Amino acid sequence: MAKIRILLADDHTLFRQGIRTLIAAEADMEVIGEAANGGDSVDRANELKPEVVLMDIGMPGLSSFEAIRQIKKNRPETKVLFLTMYDDEDYLVEGMEVGAAGYVLKDSPAQQLIAAVRDVMRGGSYLSPRMLSQLVDDFRSRIKSANRLPRFATLTTREREVLKMLAEGQSVKEIACDLNLSVKTVEAHKFNLMRKLDIHNKAQLVQYAIQKKIIKIPNLA
């Protein structure tokens, strides 16, 4: 049975030795070479033609991202798995942009790395479960934020009336008279609209009303 040919690229010798021992126990995989910096990983990939490169995300010398970009340019068929201690979405995005097929956290169980190698060899992609969970949580948060009504939309028709009249300079008593409401009721509307809009004083209220074009900027000419 043909074995998956793997290049290890990491600047820590003990870590490479541990991964080499792990892979040696798999009947369908073999480590064909190692690299300790970004530039060397490009050279070794060109020389050895691995099917999979396991690349540390923080390599010295040539950056890991640029190394992957060059490896993929020279050998598009080579699959790349980033190995990293960083559960960072920015690193993940940049890694995918340069052509990585997977992102594996270094504190993952050994079998997750083995599964990742097999997945990318079959043409798939792989994310460590913790990264996947983090992305799902972030996605849900963005959906929740997108579905949240704008603050102004939460105001009732009466609260909008009171907002406009307050911003125009009318007192609570004047508004109560004009709307045929009690002063206490107008005070309640004022409290609610300021709470909903996160406004704490008259100046902020006037500024908000101008920004939303509820009132026009006074002509000082």
Image (cartoon, rainbow, N blue to C red):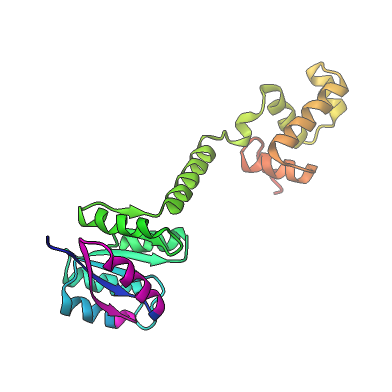
Q: Can residue 143 be seen? A: yes
89 and 19: which one is in front? 19
Q: Residue at x 17, y 77 (%)?
A: 48
Q: Does residue 74 sit above or below 198 in this rendering?
A: below
State whether residue 12 appears in this view: no
How many numbered markers are drawn?
Answer: 0
Q: Nearer the viewer, residue 156 or 140?
A: 140
Q: Quadrant of residue 44?
A: bottom left
Q: Residue furthest left?
A: 1
Q: Residue at x 37, y 54 (%)?
A: 127
Q: Is residue 131 above or below residue 43?
A: above
Closest to the observer, 145 or 218: 145
Percent position of residue 129, x then y: 42, 51
Task: Name the foreground residue: 62 vs 27.
Answer: 27
Q: Estimate the x, y position of residue 6 in percent, counting from the top left.
A: 23, 69
What segment carries the magenta color? 14-39
Work out whether 221 lies above or below 172. below
Residue positioned 21% across, 61% down in the render: 27
Residue occupying the point 29% across, 53% down: 125
Say whether residue 20 is magenta: yes
In the displayed structure, does residue 175 sit left or right of residue 98?
Answer: right
Query: Residue 26, image x and y in percent?
Result: 26, 62
Q: Quadrant of residue 28?
A: bottom left
Magenta stretch encompasses residue 136: no
Q: Residue furthest top?
A: 180
State the image quarter where residue 157 is shown: top right
Left or right position of 59 against 27: right
Quarter of the image for the N terminus: give it.
bottom left
| Residue 216 spot, x, y in % from top left | 65, 39
